[in-house]
């Protein structure tokens, strides 16, 4: 059976995250440089193989001082660990629009299994004849599972940062010839 390759359309895709700050609000951020390559046996993506690579240097929380701190050894240590990688292991089709995407996520040389909820938004042809597929993804990870343990205790006894990180994405793929 032949397979179809799909490549990321970076101008119509985004990858973001949220984490609790002072346990009373969220701080949002995004990675502005990442790649997703997908191979499918059919256009319903039920047997898709997905590989995503994120350039950690591209982290952006709209605060350059915080971004620099996230790049250093307290968090991502980008000089030693420049990329985050996801490789799918299984796709579970829940219905025509919803999937569970299972895979291995590697951050700072630590690999853990994760599950992402993926909504398949459909396939369309753009004005230039390219076939595109759209997806929305959501998931949660515990940053401590990947060796990102930095925190500070506040005078009230709480901590500065939550452990749970919410991951979100809107991904558009282009069917390759």
Image (cartoon, grey):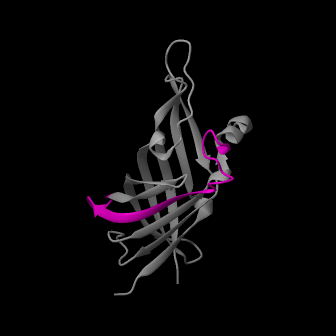
Task: Tell whether 125 sits left or right of 73.
Answer: left
Q: Position of residue 135 (x, y in %)?
A: 44, 59
- Residue closest to the far top: 156
Q: Position of residue 103 (x, y in %)?
A: 39, 60
> Can you say whether 165 is above or below 23 in the image?
below
Q: Residue at x 26, y 60 (%)?
A: 95
Task: Tell whether 40 sits left or right of 79.
Answer: left
* Quadrant of the frame with the N terminus: bottom left
Q: Residue at x 32, y 69 (%)?
A: 46
Q: Camera-side residue: 176 or 141?
A: 141
Give the quarter of the image for residue 129.
Answer: bottom right
Q: Residue at x 51, y 23 (%)?
A: 159
Q: Camera-side residue: 175 or 90?
A: 90
Q: Position of residue 3 (x, y in %)?
A: 40, 82
- Residue closest to the far bottom: 1
Q: Camera-side residue: 58 or 126?
A: 58
Give the quarter of the image for residue 140.
Answer: top left
Q: Which residues are magenta?
A: 71-99
The verdict on residue 80 being magenta is: yes
> Can you say whether 91 is above or below 144 in the image?
below
> Can you say whether 131 is above or below 30 in the image?
below
The verdict on residue 173 being magenta is: no
> Can you say whether 111 is above or below 61 in the image?
below
Task: Tell whether 25 sits left or right of 90.
Answer: right
- Residue closest to the far left: 94
Q: Position of residue 107 (x, y in %)?
A: 52, 52
């Amino acid at each position: 059976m032949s397979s179809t390759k799909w490549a990321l359309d970076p101008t119509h895709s985004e990858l973001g995250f949220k984490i609790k700050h002072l346990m009373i609000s969220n701080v949002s951020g995004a990675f502005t440089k990442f790649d997703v390559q997908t191979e499918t046996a059919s256009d319903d993506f039920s047997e898709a193989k997905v590989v995503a690579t994120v350039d950690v240097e591209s982290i952006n929380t709209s605060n350059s001082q915080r971004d620099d701190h996230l790049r250093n050894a307290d968090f991502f240590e980008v000089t030693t660990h420049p990329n985050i990688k996801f490789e799918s292991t299984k796709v579970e089709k829940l219905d025509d629009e919803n999937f569970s995407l299972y895979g291995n996520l590697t951050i700072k040389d630590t690999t853990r299994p994760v599950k992402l909820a993926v909504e398949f938004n459909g396939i369309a042809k753009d004005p230039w004849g390219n076939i595109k597929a759209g997806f929305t993804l959501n998931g949660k990870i515990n940053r401590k599972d990947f060796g990102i343990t930095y925190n500070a205790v506040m005078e009230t006894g709480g901590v500065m940062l939550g452990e749970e990180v919410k991951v979100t994405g809107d991904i558009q793929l282009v069917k390759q010839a």
